[in-house]
Amino acid sequence: MINVTRRQFLKITAAGLGSSSLALLGFSPEPALAELRNYKLARTTETRNTCPYCSVSCGVLLYSLGDRSKNVKSEIIHIEGDPDNPVNRGTLCPKGAGLLDMIHSADRLKYPEVREPGTTEWKRISWDEALDRVAKHLKADRDANFIKTNDAGVTVNRWNTTGFLASSAASNEAGYLSHKVLRGLGNIALDTQARI
């Protein structure tokens, strides 16, 4: 234990009381810290977005440096909760607070890839090729497994062999359109990320 004399104890107490009283009188470093934060982000571009992790759809602010018009690649340098978003009002959970690490991760998949049957290697393909492949496989599966009528002869128009998982971070309009298109194709196995 540290040996403190009575006189030293009184000096320490007086210094603590004095410094806390100055903060109460308005001599606080908070304005200086706020100016420092604004200075750090002064040259950045602010973009509003939605956190991709769960169905809560928290709003986030992405701050990026760079200018494509000047041939400088833009890079996200800071992410924080959106205080104007009615869902999270500026707060983020631990996963949302770690979005910057996910964005800059070397393991993050940025392009479509395919692993052909019988191989162990993943091959990078273009977005057009990926969408064409998905459409081709969906059409082949629907043509092979579409059920027009049940055993009693009642028209059911079902497609039971393919399911669809919708994003819970999408807007109501995007969810509605996805649902209508898939129901129109006969798909009955629809779910959303919100239930996972």
Image: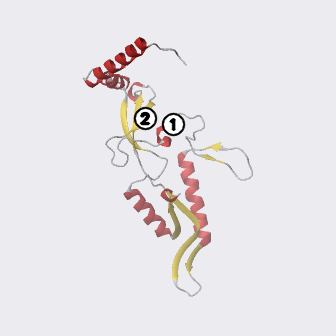
- Residue 84, image x and y in percent? 31, 42
Residue drawn where x is 61% and y is 71% of the image: 145
Left or right of residue 81: residue 130: right
**Which amino acid type corresponds to the residue marked 1 in the rendered image?**
Ile
Foreground of the two, 81 or 109: 81
Quarter-wise, where is residue 5 in the image?
top left
User: In the rendered view, would you say 137 is above or below 14?
Assistant: below
Q: Is residue 87 above or below residue 187?
A: above
Where is residue 63 shown, x and y percent of the image?
Answer: 40, 32
Coloring scheme used: secondary structure
Query: Quick check: marks 1 and 2 in contact, CB under 8 Å?
Result: yes
Nearer the camera: disc 1 or disc 2: 2
Q: Which of pointers 1 and 2 lies earlier in the amino acid sequence?
A: 2
Mark-to-mark CA distance, 1 and 2: 10 Å
Is the residue marked by circle 2 packed among few (<14), some (14-19), or many (20+) residues within 10 Å? some
Q: Which residue is mark 2?
A: 79
Helix or strand or loop: what does disc 2 sit on?
strand
Q: Amino acid at mark 2?
A: Ile
Point 51% across, 36% down: residue: 103
What residue appears at the point 57 percent right and 82 percent down from the top-left corner?
150
Task: Farthest residue to the front: give it.
Answer: 6
Residue 19's image quarter?
top left
Q: How many marks?
A: 2
